[in-house]
């Protein structure tokens, strides 16, 4: 299927989740994926989490985080559905999620291009690294991406570092031995960067999110064409139930297991 056919798809948009709780936001993401699997719906989210560690689906939580730092800061460690590495989130970090049909052509580069075009519209030149599924500006990583496929639906999500506490980011995560040998802790910290110094138009993260959203709309970026989607009371109840049963569960967060009957089935 060509790009024109893909770009003709309509999507219901969700600008903000209304929550900065990682358990709720990850539950909402999964809930929207389940909805997309039931009908002809696609979703786009921009969202933020309070300080937290989000680990990949197949990671060992104990080995990925600096336990002493995380405990001292009281940071929740929450497992997501996609693979990939552990990431540090705070309110200076903007997360995005594309929830679309799983079809040919929807690779990391396809979605990275939408973000790069939006950043370019804001005067920031960014590049995509296929090997790492990262977006970099001036040689520093500002975005990492991950994907999850299930039941005909593709979730592609990632981060955009705008005004993140990079010192906390460096301290919260355990650096893999191979990367430590190649770069060292200080060099690993130096390989990431924030967008804020390059965007004087955005005084804070909220303004950056508003600008990003507007750039998406102006350029007619795919998936940002339709009306905003508001959760119904029934939606809210379902999301909060999923957050409680799965994303606040130590079984899921520590071991990657969950009760399929309670949470609505395999995902």
Image: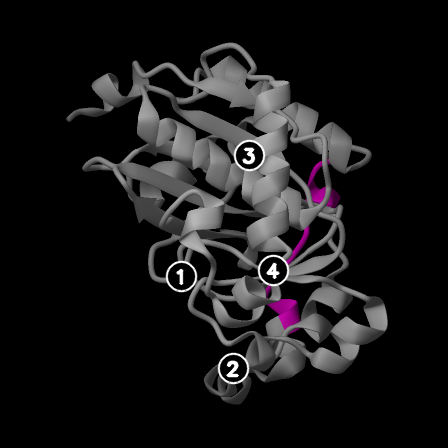
Q: Which residue is mark 2?
A: 176
The residue positioned 44% from the left and 15% from the top of the image is 220
Res 132 → quadrant: bottom left
Q: Which residue is mark 1?
A: 132
Image coords of residue 42 (percent x, y): 39, 24
Residue 95, visible in the rendered structure = no
Magenta-span inclusion, residue 15: no
Which mark lies nearer to you, 4 or 2? 4
Marks 4 and 2, the one that precedes in the sequence:
2
Please identify, in this view, whether the residue under mark 2 or under mark 1 is nearer the observer.
2
Compared across the picture, whether 34 is left or right of 167 comes to left
What's the residue at 76%, 31% (across, down)? 206
Q: Secondary structure at mark 2?
A: loop
Q: Residues within 10 Å of mark 1 (few under 14, many from 20)?
A: few
Q: Earlier in the sequence, mark 2 or mark 3?
A: 3
Residue that mark 3 sits on? 119
Q: Report the Cα–Cα distance between label 4 and label 3.
A: 37 Å
Question: Could you say where residue 123 lies in the image, as x and y percent from the top left?
Answer: 60, 32
Closest to the camera, between mark 1 and mark 4, is 4
Q: Nearer the viewer, mark 2 or mark 3?
A: 2
| Residue 11: image location, x then y, percent | 42, 18
N-term-proximal mark, 3 vs 1 = 3
Residue at left 55%, top 81%? 183
Q: Position of residue 60 (x, y in %)?
A: 50, 76
Q: Measure how far apart labels 4 and 2 are at the Cα level.
A: 26 Å
């Amino acid at each position: 299927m060509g790009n024109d056919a893909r770009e003709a798809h309509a999507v219901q948009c969700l600008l903000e989740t209304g929550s900065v709780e990682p358990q709720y936001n990850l539950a909402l993401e999964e809930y929207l994926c389940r909805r997309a699997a039931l009908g002809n719906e696609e979703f786009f989210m921009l969202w933020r989490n309070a300080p937290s560690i989000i680990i990949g689906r197949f990671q060992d939580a104990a080995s990925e985080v600096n336990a002493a730092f995380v405990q001292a800061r009281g940071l929740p460690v929450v497992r997501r559905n996609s693979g990939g590495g552990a990431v540090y989130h705070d309110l200076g970090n903007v997360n995005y999620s594309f929830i679309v049909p799983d079809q040919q052509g929807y690779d990391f580069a396809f979605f990275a291009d939408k973000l790069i075009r939006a950043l370019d519209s804001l005067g920031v030149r960014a590049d995509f690294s296929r090997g790492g599924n990262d977006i970099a500006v001036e040689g520093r990583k500002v975005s990492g991406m991950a994907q999850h496929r299930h039941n005909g639906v593709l979730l592609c999500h990632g981060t955009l570092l705008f005004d993140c506490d990079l010192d906390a980011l460096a301290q919260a995560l355990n650096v893999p031995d191979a990367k430590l040998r190649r770069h060292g802790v200080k060099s690993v910290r130096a390989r990431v960067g924030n967008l804020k110094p390059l965007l004087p138009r955005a005084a804070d993260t909220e303004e950056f999110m508003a600008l990003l959203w507007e750039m998406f709309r102006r350029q007619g970026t795919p998936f940002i064409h339709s009306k905003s989607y508001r959760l119904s009371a029934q939606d809210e109840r379902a999301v909060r139930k999923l957050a409680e049963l799965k994303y606040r569960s130590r079984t899921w967060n520590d071991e990657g297991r969950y009760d399929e009957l309670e949470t609505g089935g395999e995902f």
